[in-house]
Image (tube, rainbow, N blue to C red):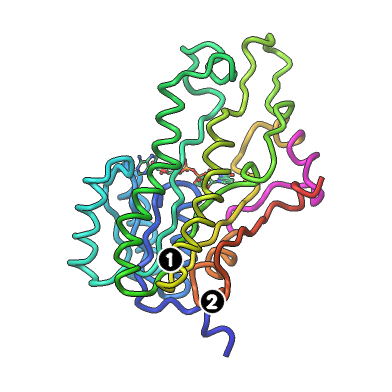
Amino acid sequence: MVLEKFNLTGKVCIITGGAGFLGKKHAEAILESDGIPVILDINENKINEAVDSLKKQYKKEVVGYNVDITKKSEILKVKNRILENFSRIDVLINNAANNPKIEEKENLKNWTHFENFPESIWNQDLNVGLKGAFFCSQVFGKVMAENKKGVILNISSDLGIIAPDQRIYLKNSLKDEEQFKKPVTYSVVKYALIGLTKYLATYWADKSIRVNAICPGGVFNNQDKDFVAKLTNLIPMGRMADPDEYKAAILFLVSDASSYMTGSTIIIDGGRTCW
Ligand SMILES: NC(=O)c1ccc[n+]([C@@H]2O[C@H](COP(=O)([O-])OP(=O)(O)OC[C@H]3O[C@@H](n4cnc5c(N)ncnc54)[C@H](O)[C@@H]3O)[C@@H](O)[C@H]2O)c1
């Protein structure tokens, strides 16, 4: 039966940044197929809130650990705790990333402009989005390689396929030098995750670890109306994604439903990258 292939019963599925906006949705997808989500996040309050609400909603096991994925020593410690609790690791979703909002870091005037982009923010963004994925794949992938089975899913973006269209971030009220730009680090991290996906897919193919990437388009989350109008104008389907619209693809990619798929990138973006 084809639906059985989506079943994750008893499978331990790690989600980095799992207490965030989409991380919780990945956890829901796993719970809805009877897997066990293990949320790794750096924000204690958000972890508690996510674990409590998921447990309440699904009445199933969910765990969360406070870990900074930019520190390998912390990941190694949490790996031991996960193995003590569950004796297995089946799935890793590299989801955590910095996603700077327009209103943040106003003290650094036009810090988002490439010409001025601070080395410190370059380091922070690459540390979370890329080094974090590297460390987690190293530590949890090693366990999977020893067991000769596992799945790694890297969360890239439509901006891992195309360049950001900086015009959608423009605000009429601001002077040129005050405008927000989508940071260069976002493109660099999201393209690099596709490279990491292909590297690990081939590197660990003989250990039966499948490694794929998903490139979601922007999710509607009450963004500014003017921004939404400009973005949706770039999307053939004429709208942003609903937060639940990636769950089926996540489940497909982390389960045996995608058993012949590795090194691939699935783009789900309402058609944006066609234009
Ligand atoms: N939201 C979207 O529209 C969208 C679209 C395309 C791709 N994505 C990608 O999906 C992923 C999730 O996005 P989101 O919107 O849920 O973001 P989010 O900011 O809500 O979640 C990111 C989570 O990562 C955690 N985190 C940050 N640094 C960490 C660290 N050092 N160690 C552990 N955890 C850390 C944060 O605490 C946060 O909970 C990101 O990779 C993002 O680029 C999002």
Question: Which of the marked residues, 1 or 2, is nearer the chain's N terminus?
Answer: 1
> In the rendered structure, which amino acid carries the disc numbered 2?
Ser
Residue nearest the viewer, comparing 212 with 106: 212
- Label 2 CB sits under 8 Å from any ligand 1 atom: no
Alpha carbon distance from label 1 to label 2: 14 Å
Q: Residue 259, image x and y in percent? A: 53, 76
* Residue 32 on image: x %, y %: 47, 71
Q: Residue at x 51, y 35 (%)?
A: 99
Query: What residue is disc 1 on?
Result: 204
Depicted 61 relative to depicted 140: above or below: below
Q: Secondary structure at mark 2?
A: loop
Circle 1/circle 2 CB separation < 8 Å: no
Main secondary structure of the magenta stretch? loop
Say the numbered circle drawn on residue 259: 2
| Numbered tag placed on residue 120 in the rendering | none
Q: Is residue 241 magenta?
A: yes
Q: Which residues are magenta?
A: 230-244
Q: Is residue 236 above or below residue 166?
A: below
Q: Residue furthest bottom?
A: 1
Q: Is residue 125 left or right of residue 213?
A: left
Residue closest to the eye, 54 or 267: 267
Task: Give x and y (percent) for residue 180.
Answer: 61, 21
Q: Name the residue at 34% across, 68% down.
A: 144
Q: Secondary structure at mark 1?
A: loop
- For mark 2, does the 10 Å Cα neighbourhood hold few (<14), some (14 to 19), or many (20 or more) residues? some
Instruction: Identify the image quadrant of residue 121.
Output: top left
Magenta residue check for 257:
no
Q: Quadrant of the image for the N terminus?
A: bottom right
Looking at the rendered image, the disc whose residue lies closer to the viewer, 1 or 2, is 1
* Amino acid type for the residue under numbered disc 1: Trp
